Image (cartoon, helix red, strand yellow):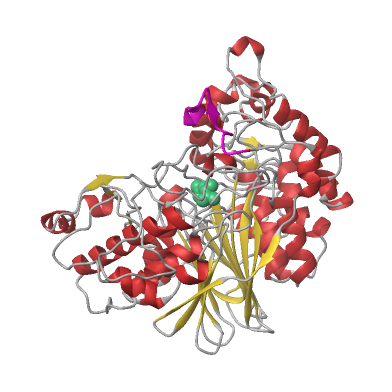
Amino acid sequence: MRRPVARNLSGLAVAAVMVTVGAAAPPSSTTGATGTPPKVPLAVGYGGAVSSVDADASAAGIEVLRRGGNAVDAAVATAAALGVTEPYSAGVGGGGYFVYYDAKTRQVHTIDGRETAPLTADSGLFLENGKPLAFGDAVTSGLSVGTPGTPATWQTALDTWGSERLGSVLRPAQKLARDGFTVDPTFRSQTEGNQARFKDFPDSAKLFLPGGALPVVGSTFKNPDLARTYEELGRDGVGAIYRGDIGDDIVRTVNKPPVDPASGRVARPGKLSVEDLKAYGTKLQAPTKTSYRGLGVYSMAPSSSGGTTVGEALNILGRTDLSKATQEQYLHRYIEASRIAFADRGRWVGDPAFEDVPAKDLLSQRFADSRACLIKDDAVLTSPLAPGDPRHPGACGKPGDKAAPTTFEGENTTHLTVADKWGNVVAYTLTIESTGGSGITVPGRGFLLNNELTDFSFAPANPAVHDPNLPGPGKRPRSSISPTIVLDRHNQPVVALGSPGGATIITTVLQTLTGFVDRGLPLVDAIAAPRASQRNAAATELEPGLWNSPLRSDLEKIGHVFKQNPEIGAATGVQRLKNGEWLAAAEKVRRGGGSAMVVTPAPGD
Ligand code: GLU
């Protein structure tokens, strides 16, 4: 959807093989003589693979793989390019979670690069006169800005597993920011959705509303400030953010949001300090592991709820044969397993540095069995469903605590998946939370600040139940991010995937995985399949493909309640084929279609 201008990513010749497109959006045409390929949702070949939402970003990763970089180098290059072309979803002002499979040791490692609350924050961060702030007021404020984790994630990943320096993997993105990319309808419409608040912040307006107007589709969008920021990070290291001049600018901006006084907008200040930036650290931690149909499913442990919630639902579903179920039975069981897993997530998952999170127990088969038995073939559970007690799995139907509905979370970010020729794999989801984050651009630096702290509960959803996701000093808000790598019984990769979408990330990953593993769908079709999302709410969300299908009334007959959601998630994935061949898959239609690429279509090219 976002076509590169002629000068970008010099000399790139990337193989993108369209094997099947189905209902795909028409691929964008190749522009200029650079050979940057059209955007396609499926590519098969050798030398490694990259899948992201954006052709420029996938091409940046392929460029790094082609010159001998590994999957980690390519993932950082792709992420940095997404910071240019998807600035409303990701960037150095945000955070994320990085999952890495090491082909030599056949082990999975993760980095928690989540944003953190200021050291001065307490549970009342989003209360004013004892009442929760309106969500929108909290989003567009300094209060919602957490210490960014993305720069530190890139540095940690490169230091630990990479083969190139930060400066060299940032170069393709730097060039893209300097020379520009071609504005597409998605970029314009996301800008439009932010126009009202961007125009109240002169630095956001100057960057994203050039000449006071929306960027024109087909025009070239440049971000020289971001090019300079990347150049500085490449030269001086990420210390420029955590202990240096870029960090000083971040702190100044959060503490006094640069709002136009004439706009009348109240942009509440935050209390982020240089001490917060200095204190920030990524966490290298063990992944969650769930055994499913003889495979090992590895994902993010808390502070993300992704791994435990997808894992619990898989453990519940593992008790039934989904391959033989009808489509109606499959969807029913998937919806109910999601409902149950979300009930438990809400009660038990928060930042483990602050909360006693029973991650291991949430993933025990014994606990899953005590929950799976709640599911009936001909009836639907009532939400909000009460959580179980994973430490003391009770008899079936005896939930351990009072129910609390799932609190509101925003829905936008981006996911990329990379594999290299050595067999290393990265699944990496990065975010600035809402589309456009806090709406506040750091003056002269070319990036938006996140509003990740609005992922905290503003107040307990049910005052009678402990909420592990209230704000606290230096605490990480609970995430739903679920970058997932699946290994076979020899600990070789089978598939890796992930998605944006706030709390719907969990259901998207679960549905895509079961579509691929149980329903026999090719990865690109498992990604394209119309989605349902149940998160312990009265109504299950359905995309139009299911809403308009006879399956809806079949499911309503046994008690399901639905509402429409026009679009859920934007997944990407890679699949290992035989003899060093990889398949990269992305969305056919959602968000204008994604971009799957491989280094070369034929072995030995
Ligand atoms: N802030 C969300 C989370 O961490 C991600 C936002 C999104 O995916 O849209 O769960």
**Residue appearing at x 19%, y 65% in the figure:** 328
In the displayed structure, 539 sits above or below 340; it is above
- From the top left corner, tell me how far across and down residue 596 is, in percent: 53, 63
In the displayed structure, 87 sits above or below 138; it is below
Give the left or right position of residue 138, taking residue 295 as reference: right
Residue extending furthest top? 262
- From the top left corner, tell me how far across and down residue 112 is, in percent: 64, 59
Q: Quadrant of residue 73?
A: bottom right
Q: Quadrant of the C terminus?
A: bottom right
> Is 265 or 517 nearer to us in this picture?
265
| Residue 258 lies in the magenta stretch | no
Give the left or right position of residue 350, taking residue 224 as reference: left
Q: Say whether residue 521 is visible.
A: no
Give the left or right position of residue 255, taking residue 213 as reference: right
Q: Say whether residue 603 is visible.
A: yes
Residue extending furthest bottom? 490
In magenta, the rendered stretch is 122-136
> Is 116 or 323 nearer to us in this picture?
116
Total marks in image? 0
- From the top left corner, tell me how far across and down residue 553 is, in percent: 13, 54
**Residue appearing at x 56%, y 85% in the figure:** 491
**Residue appearing at x 68%, y 84% in the figure:** 105
In the displayed structure, 101 sits above or below 505; it is below
In terms of secondary structure, what is the magenta stretch mainly? loop
Give the left or right position of residue 457, taking residue 229 as reference: left
Q: Quadrant of residue 58?
A: bottom right
Residue extending furthest right? 236
- From the top left corner, tell me how far across and down residue 102 is, in percent: 66, 78
